[in-house]
């Protein structure tokens, strides 16, 4: 049985903190692999301009190509309609019944977890790997974890992570202003963005 971390997200664009977060989860949870899964049509971000799935897939593949235990998964990109984590996990557990899945998320996402689409299904199909980022109030986080365990019988691992917050929106804003963001991005991704003129405006 393989232990697989699932790193989902729009990846608009993928940045260095995504990779460091996945590395922290890989080491702390003793995972065999981390699968990066760009989302298709996210119902949570339907009003945000997002490059095509092919473009985001290209960036993810470039970012992880030299790390043997990081893999690309296009399952959500191939599914038509809105992307729901519950549906993804149902499909993955059906395709790979011997794998143990860890769904990785930040503490901010965990706070909104009760409002996700079928959170009870998600909790039943995987372990939630919640990344404890700097600035998260420890007592509030522990209370939230206790609530998720009680309400959804969730299996939860808290993953320590000392990196300062970095968001894709910050990267996009810098690029839109014409500023370099090479220090925030994997080198091949920064070059891909330059070559394709991405994020110079946000109308894709």
Image (cartoon, grey):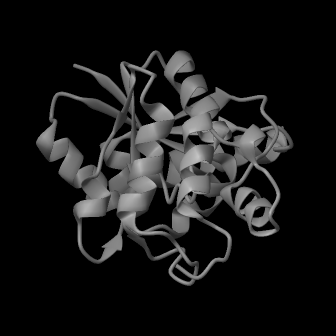
Q: Is residue 57 above or below residue 81?
A: above
Q: Residue at x 55, y 55 (%)?
A: 195
Instruction: Say which quarter of the image contains residue 136.
Output: top right
Asked whether 47 or 109 is in front, the reply is 47
Disc count in the image?
A: 0
Q: Residue at x 25, y 53 (%)?
A: 75
Residue 58, position as x, y percentages in the image: 40, 50
Q: Quadrant of the N terminus?
A: top left
Q: Residue at x 63, y 77 (%)?
A: 202
Q: Is residue 142 visible?
A: yes
Q: Is residue 119 above or below residue 204?
A: above
Q: Is residue 170 above or below residue 156?
A: below
Instruction: Say which quarter of the image contains residue 45.
Output: bottom right
Residue 198, position as x, y percentages in the image: 59, 64
Residue 166, position as x, y percentages in the image: 75, 47
Asked whether 112 or 162 is in front, the reply is 162
Asked whether 47 or 88 is in front, the reply is 47
- Left or right of 163? Residue 101 is left
- Left or right of 64? Residue 48 is right
Q: Is residue 7 visible?
A: no
- Left or right of 30? Residue 91 is left
Residue 19, position as x, y percentages in the image: 58, 34
- Left or right of 201? Residue 173 is right
Q: Residue furthest front?
A: 195
């Amino acid at each position: 049985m393989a232990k697989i971390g699932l790193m989902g997200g729009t990846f608009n664009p993928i940045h260095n903190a995504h990779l460091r977060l996945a590395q922290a989860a890989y080491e702390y949870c003793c995972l065999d692999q981390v699968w990066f899964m760009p989302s298709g049509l996210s119902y949570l971000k339907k009003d945000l301009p997002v490059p095509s799935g092919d473009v985001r897939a290209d960036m993810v593949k470039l970012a992880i190509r030299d790390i043997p235990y990081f893999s690309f998964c296009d399952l959500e990109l191939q599914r038509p309609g809105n992307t729901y984590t519950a549906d993804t996990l149902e499909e993955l557990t059906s395709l790979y019944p011997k794998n143990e899945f860890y769904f990785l998320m930040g503490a901010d996402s965990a706070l909104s977890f009760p409002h996700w689409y079928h959170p009870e299904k998600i909790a039943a199909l995987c372990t939630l790997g919640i990344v404890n980022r700097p600035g998260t109030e420890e007592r509030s986080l522990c209370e939230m974890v206790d609530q998720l365990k009680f309400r959804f019988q969730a299996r939860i691992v808290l993953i320590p992570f000392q990196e300062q917050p970095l968001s894709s929106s910050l990267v996009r804003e810098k690029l839109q202003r014409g500023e370099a963001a090479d220090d925030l991005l994997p080198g091949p991704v920064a070059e891909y963005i330059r070559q394709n003129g991405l994020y110079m405006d946000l109308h894709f």
